Image (cartoon, rainbow, N blue to C red):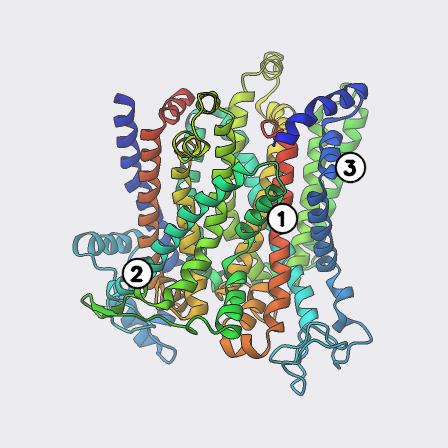
Amino acid sequence: MGSAVVDIPGEAEEEARQPSISPWRAALRRLLRKKIAVIALLLIGAFYFVGLFAPLLAPCRLSFCPLSTQDYRSQDLDNTLLGPSLEHPFGTDRLGRDQLSRVIWSARTTIIVTIATVVAGSLLLSVGLGLLSGYMGGKVDTIIMRTGEAFGSLPALPMLILINATMRDRVRGWVDGFERNLSTGDPAFIAVLGILTLVAIIGIVAWLLESRRNGGWIALSVVAAFLILALWGLQAVFATPGASDYFLIFGALSLFFWVGSARVIRSQVLALRETEYVIAARSMGAGTWRILGSHLLPNVSPIIIVGVSASLGAIAGSEIALTFLGVGVHDPTPSFGALIFDGGTSQPVIRNHPHLLIFPAVVVGMLIFSFNLLGDALNDVLTPKAR
Amino acid sequence: MQGLLSYTIQRLLWAPVILLFVSFFAFALTRLGPVDSVDVLAGPRADDEAKDRVRQELHLDDSIFEQYGVYMKNLLIEGDFGESVTIYRGVPVWDIIWPRMLVSVQFGIVALFFAFSIGTLVGVFAALRQGTWLDPLSISSFLFFQSIPVLVSLPFLVLIFVVKLGWLPAVGWGGPEIDIGPQEIALGIFSKHIILPALVLSLPGMAGVARLVRATTLSVLGEDYVRTARAKGLPELQVVRNHVVRNSLLPLVTVIGLSLTTLIEGAFFVELILGIPGIGQLGFQAAQSRDYDVILALVLVIATAFILINIVTDIAYTFIDPRIRFGSQGNN
């Protein structure tokens, strides 16, 4: 912190000499100057790359895979519990499945759950509710904040276990129902997609044609585009095996992970609500949504980024924890929780086959540590107080 | 003092409201969540007639509000949490939970003690060494230990201390036994069994406390009164002990609630991996065998403890630091 104080005059001068630089560019530059943050970013980037391209990267999908069916699920009962070797760099588990492939596919599970939870819980719920309750005040504020307080004052893990243990079958039923009704070949699905595309195009055209460039039209097409993406995404997710587990986990996690950042955003909005530019916008007749969207949202976005980066590690950890306890993702979908459970709970396994524990545990440890390092660095870079 | 009193009353009145909300939410989950809870209750081979009988016996045909009313009435008036269905069939839930809670509380308290005592010492030490080569090392190692989940660190500790070195007992729980009614429990505090769980549970909390103490100590070190104390020639030890540490420990009160979360959540993994008969292991068993009333009771007990402790720390902090109280009034 001492060194940061010394840095400020130099940085300020540098930024003053280049008046065109945007605050985001400046923040990014400050972030990239931190070596630890860059290392953390690279590690997280590598993790995401490996997870997203799991179907291509996992060795048991490539031609040199020694197993016949070439899948992370394929078992080879003649070669169970092998130690690390050239053929199986991370060894094999008790069913002869290639551990490296399972680690890579687990990364994919973690990525799906973290992204879904961040989008649903951290972005939609916490930003929306935080902005609303800060700006509207009064009853809306009381209801939102009291609900948040109720959720925030609960120990999350026992609640998550309860939700997952009780709702599992029901959610599976829902997801199966959706899956039947939401196939890409369905004429209704195609019709909805077509209508949404039409709306998006109309929005863009109207925005371009109108002389005053009212933001409403472009917002309409953005919403339509978002719905299209969401439909496609849902359809793709429903089609994957184990989809109901993902839904249950990210739904339950979202319930608990919006509170913290919503509270911070609200307090920031409370302060911003009285600033001149918001009052000016209001006196010119701007509506609530316009003020929220184009005046308040950009000004709280640094906080949102800090909040999201801080919660990423916790979300990833929760998914792993739930799966470890048997109420998360289920076999055969691999997850780090299941891998660590298999490798780290029985002492004979720890004693004789430590590779089953070490590889997944080290990956998880590095991932969560990197998330926290990055969150810390972003906090330094984006929060004015810490600078 | 008026503000403090009304604040305290406000907080205390708020607690039952949250508890009501939580209990209804949790209760509704156990009754409405499963597709058909009778499937579990009646056993796998029950025919339709038997299922109907079970449904009637348990009033599952009533509305959820009526069921909730009955449950809460039994709970509040008779302290009756219902009976276990699958794990220990017919045993009252409270008789299952109570002995296990006493086991979990033992290593929880020891872990809390370690976390705060050692964390404070390390944090103050790191703050005093700011600017030396130790500084970046200590910051990153704190963050590291805070980041690593218990379910990752514990197997490694087992690998090192139990399997390789053989210093600690393998698994389980032991020590002198005392009788507490439903059954006997072992006092692990007096045996080696407590070392591993207490150690692994205190690590993240210790690192968190150390980080916080380091930050607050640094800000206190820049205060005028510290400079004054040094200027008048007080020995450094006295400056640190009387002027710095006293003031930098205040914010610690706020993290007691937070470290309690870590403890409760960590207990699930510690007990599962080490085979300790505490509430975490019970929660796991109950979730596996879908003994919903046991999970429900666990959630209620933990939530109650949690909310009460949060309120106590809130009030304690307001008592210590009047700015909080006035800040909250300023917002309204």
Q: Which mark is residue A201?
A: 3
Asked whether disc 2 touches disc 1, contact meaning CB atoms under 8 Å apart, the reply is: no
In this view, the residue in front, A8 or B284, is A8
Is the residue marked by circle 1 packed among few (<14), some (14-19), or many (20+) residues within 10 Å? many
Question: What residue is drawn where x is 59% and y is 73%?
Answer: A354
Residue situated furthest bottom in the rendering: A78
Q: Which mark is residue B96?
A: none
Question: What residue is drawn where x is 31% and y is 48%?
Answer: B304
Residue under pointer 1: A371
Q: Quadrant of residue B97?
A: bottom left
Q: Quadrant of residue A72?
A: bottom right
Label 3, secondary structure: give it.
Answer: helix
Q: Are marks 3 and 1 on the same chain?
A: yes
In the rendered image, residue A384, in percent from the top left (x then y), is placed at 61, 27
* A264 relative position to A79: left or right: left
Q: Looking at the image, is mark 3 or mark 1 earlier in the sequence?
A: 3
Q: Is residue B125 above or below residue A270?
A: below
Amino acid type for the residue under numbered disc 3: Ile
Q: Is residue B45 visible?
A: yes
Amino acid type for the residue under numbered disc 2: Met
Q: Is residue A146 above or below residue A370?
A: above
Q: Quadrant of the C terminus of chain B?
A: top left
Is the residue marked by circle 3 packed among few (<14), some (14-19), or many (20+) residues within 10 Å? some
In the rendered image, residue B120, in percent from the top left (x then y), is placed at 44, 43
Q: Is residue A259 visible?
A: no
Question: What residue is drawn where x is 43% and y is 74%?
Answer: B170
Gap in Å between the C-alphas at discs 2 and 1?
34 Å
Residue under pointer 2: B101
In the rendered image, residue A64, in percent from the top left (x then y), is placed at 82, 76
Label 2, secondary structure: give it.
Answer: helix
